[in-house]
Amino acid sequence: MRSDAMKKGVERAPHRSLLYALGLTDAEIERPIIGIVNSFNEIVPGHMHLNQISDAVKAGVLAAGGTPLVFPAIAMCDGLAMGHEGMHYSLVTRDLICDSTEAVVRAQAFDGLVMIPNCDKNVPGLLMAAARLNIPTIFCSGGPMLAGRDRKGASNALSDMFEYVGRYHAGDMTAEEVQACAVDACPTCGSCAGMYTANSMNCLSEAIGMALPGNGTIPAVYSARLRLAKEAGAQIMSLVERDIKPRDIMTEAAFANAMTVDMALGCSTNTILHLPAIANEARVPLTLDTVAEISARTPNLCQLSPAGQAFIEDLDTAGGVYGVMSELAKKDLLDTAVQTVTGKTMGENIASARNLDPETIRPVDSPFSEYGGIAVLRGNLAVDGCVVKQSAVAPDMMQHSGPARVFDSEEAVTAAIFDGKINKGDVVVVRYEGPKGGPGMKEMLTPTAAISGMGLGQDVALITDGRFSGATRGAAIGHISPEAMEGGTIALVEEGDRISIDIAAGSLTLDVADDILAARRAAWTAPEPKVKHGYLARYARMVSSADKGAILP
């Protein structure tokens, strides 16, 4: 066992004395030692209940003959960080989570791991750590929040709340009405109720084979979530016994499966940052070209909030992730021979899965669209690519051309939107918000929700070298690479330039002559970094571009 390095032989008597200090008996020390990575904290609604999940996982480990020992991982709430300094720190926590987990696991010689994540950067950070460490590991998330309802019974979730702020500024809602909705929007613990980033990544943990069925969709408050946690705790013992490791599971074929399910579900564009970062740790190639290829052949079967009115609880009732995969398998769109944490192949896992609600999960022969939920665009404005959640774009905005309205920060564009300075037909450009320029690649949910709330969602596009929340809808194009801070073309856009968007054709073009762009480039100089000290400054110096997953070396 890996833990023998700290518990066997006379030379390890000092180590055993410390294990005794934990209250462990000789019998407990002899057993496989399982690290329980508990992401509990009291500031993130998706994590406030994880001690209960952790206790259930421990019960499963104990019942199966292991010794569970808990240690923490950090997590933050993107919703609470949105629209102020805190959003600089969102994406960067992904790598802190990965690095700090690596440090603890290598230092303490665990035999296996159960990861208990839930929210946006916590899930990919721990998946990265699992791939890097490559010891037997299983995931059991905290589960999604139930959707809220307003006083009239209509659905009401976090994405709606951000749009209500725009409606308030447009004069369509009073402050009292907004507050009444706020009370009901997030009614339970769990990751926010739509197909936002956290739920996207928890669903993809199933699709890639690292979690048991139901991990992505069983609501946080259901007792079935506790049963799942016990099953995960027991299953890690089987993985340890058989020495099934993450890189045995997270193969190139498994990543292709995950990306295919991503396109069918209509997941957050943030997955196009996280899957390449996880693949990098798993030593698997995954590029935007792969994303574009899989999107082109994968039908979009689900339109969950913000793209539609269904929520994760509805997906769970409809058959969950495996229900979606059962539809995709009918067209041979998945590699069903891949290994999973169940100890079985994916084909064996989904053999009994069924689509129980063809309105929530469209049959593969009758999809919402013939192409995937996310599109990759290229052109002179995004030479290395950019992404858009095309399943959440109004049909009239799939092709659009308009004058550029240029802003060098999220704060500036948000103020302009609320002041009524953005007009129908505009293409809003927000730059110097990329991985280096942000730094930290802030999400732009506040301005995109403001555009929708102000009644401009079907008339205005927003493009940025930053990124978007999974709760964003509309013609919101992000991850433009190269970013402005690195001299990408987005840095050269001037007020009034015409920008043409053709999502179906995969193009994003700045309609300015090459010689004019060359002159602008010759005159351009990079601005001073916004942050010069601390972790953000180090991150900005080291991070890759968004098209590579915003990874650290």
Image (tube, rainbow, N blue to C red):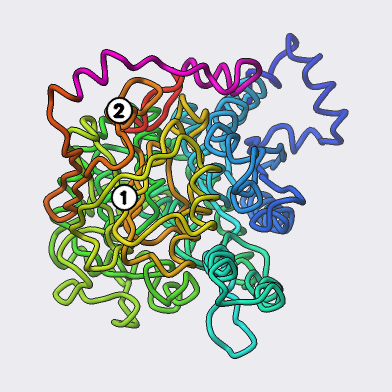
The quadrant of the picture occupied by the N terminus is top right
Q: Position of residue 425 (x, y in %)?
A: 29, 58
Point 23% across, 44% down: residue: 291
Point 56% across, 36% down: residue: 112
Label 1 sits on a secondary structure element that is: strand
497 lies above or below 227: above
Tag 2: amino acid: Leu
Q: Is residue 309 left or right of residue 530?
A: left
Q: Position of residue 336 (x, y in %)?
A: 23, 54
Q: Is residue 29 left or right of residue 286?
A: right
Mark 1 surroundings within 10 Å by alpha-carbon count, few (fewer than 14), some (14 through 19), many (20 or more): many
Tag 1: amino acid: Val
Q: Is residue 49 visible?
A: yes
538 lies above or below 156: above
Q: Earlier in the sequence, mark 1 or mark 2?
A: 1
Pick whichever, 285 or 7, lies toward us.
285
Residue 16 placement: quadrant: top right
For the view shown, which residue lies furthest in the bottom direction? 152
Q: Provide the residue designation for mark 1.
A: 427
Q: Is residue 471 visible?
A: no
Q: Residues in magenta? A: 517-542
Mark 2 surroundings within 10 Å by alpha-carbon count, few (fewer than 14), some (14 through 19), many (20 or more): some
- Measured Cα–Cα span from mark 1 to mark 2: 15 Å
Principal SS element in the magenta part? Answer: helix
Q: Provide the residue designation for mark 2.
A: 492
